[in-house]
Image (cartoon, coloured by chain):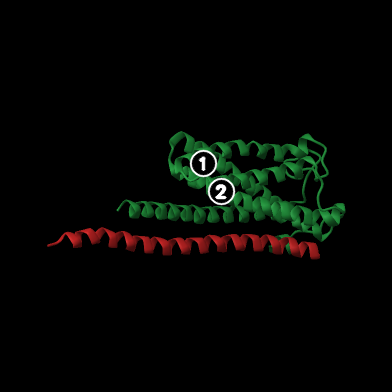
């Protein structure tokens, strides 16, 4: 927070509003990482049929959706003063919205399925398919002409970032990654407790 | 500057709200687990008690 609001230099053309970048970009990168873990968890479940993988996939899908929500909130807040509009249907923004809707559907799908094995299998298939949108979101600004700014990190020779800005960005990303890991641990523990409740209910019904 | 404030405020409220929701759900489940364990134990003991002469 200190680095983003005070430590990093003020951007020349946009001014202080550019500081949203230190939340927006790390949140997007962390959402991508979370969705990658959903993909790994989904493949892991389909291969092993072990519910441990399903719990990890579910936890990361929920957390990834939260980070993606942060991206979709901070983007328009930045866009309004800079572009003069809240939203535009360009490739990056639209594919990000689709990504968010897909993982929201993943979470809703789970609520509709009662039988644990069927729920885990269908969710794993959905988790793998939904991940296809992540590279589309990432490469959207590289492949198509978009209103969204061009990449400043890993963007080629013509892009770049002031070293202090880059350090603050990487520090913010590290903080978001730590927060993601901690939330994932808590969320997996919650799902374990939920499974214990289901198991106890079954025992109670059988007695 | 107002936009910057709202961007940071909303994001931190979102994360804090989510962390609190996990904590609240975990507490509810722990309570439910304790109740269910007691019920399972009581039900497990009941038939044995009745079968005694």
Q: Report helix, strand or loop for mark 1.
A: helix
Element type at marker 2? helix
Mark linked to residue A32: none
Q: Residue at x 43, y 40 (%)?
A: A50
Mark 2 belongs to chain: A
- Between A121 and B20, the one nearer to me in the picture: A121
Q: Position of residue A92 (x, y in %)?
A: 76, 42
> Around disc 1, counting alpha carbons within 10 Å, would you say few (fewer than 14), some (14 to 19), or many (20 or more)?
many
Q: Colour of chain A?
A: green
Q: Which mark is residue A60?
A: 2
Q: Which chain is red?
A: B
Q: Residues within 10 Å of mark 2 (few under 14, many from 20)?
A: many
Q: Report the Cα–Cα distance between label 2 and label 1.
A: 9 Å
Chain under callout 1: A
Image location (x, y in percent) of residue A72: 72, 52
Task: Pick whichever of labels 2 and 1 is earlier in the sequence.
Answer: 1
- Which residue does the numbered mark 1 point to in the structure image? A41
Determine the residue positioned at 72% across, 60% down.
A4
Please name whichever residue, A9 or B10, is drawn nearer the observer in this view of the structure: B10
Q: From what the image shows, is residue B1 above or below residue A56?
A: below
Residue B4: % across, % down: 77, 62
Could you say which quadrant of the image residue B9 lies in?
Answer: bottom right
Q: Is residue B2 above or below residue A66?
A: below
Q: Is residue A113 visible?
A: yes
């Amino acid at each position: 927070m200190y680095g983003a609001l005070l430590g990093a230099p003020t951007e020349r053309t946009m001014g202080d509003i550019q500081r949203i970048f230190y939340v927006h970009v790390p949140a997007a990168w962390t959402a991508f990482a979370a969705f990658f873990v959903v993909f790994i968890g989904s493949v892991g479940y389909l291969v092993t049929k072990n519910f441990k993988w399903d719990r990890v996939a579910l936890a990361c899908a929920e957390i990834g959706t939260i980070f993606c929500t942060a991206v979709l909130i901070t983007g328009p807040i930045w866009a309004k003063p800079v572009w003069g509009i809240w939203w535009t249907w360009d490739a990056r923004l639209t594919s990000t919205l689709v990504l968010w809707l897909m993982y929201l559907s993943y979470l809703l799908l789970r609520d509709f399925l009662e039988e644990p094995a069927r729920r885990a299998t269908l969710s794993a298939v959905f988790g793998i398919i939904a991940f296809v949108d992540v590279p589309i979101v990432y490469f959207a600004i590289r492949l198509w002409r978009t209103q969204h700014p061009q990449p400043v990190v890993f963007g080629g020779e013509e892009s770049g970032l002031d070293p202090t800005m880059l350090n603050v960005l990487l520090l913010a990303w590290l903080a978001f990654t730590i927060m993601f890991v901690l939330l994932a641990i808590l969320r997996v523990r919650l799902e374990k407790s939920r499974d214990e409740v289901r198991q106890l209910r079954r025992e109670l019904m059988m007695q | 500057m107002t936009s910057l404030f709202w961007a940071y405020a909303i994001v931190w409220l979102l994360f804090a709200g989510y962390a609190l929701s996990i904590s609240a759900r975990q507490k509810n489940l722990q309570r439910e687990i304790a109740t269910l364990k007691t019920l399972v134990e009581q039900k497990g003991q009941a038939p044995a008690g009745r079968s005694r002469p």
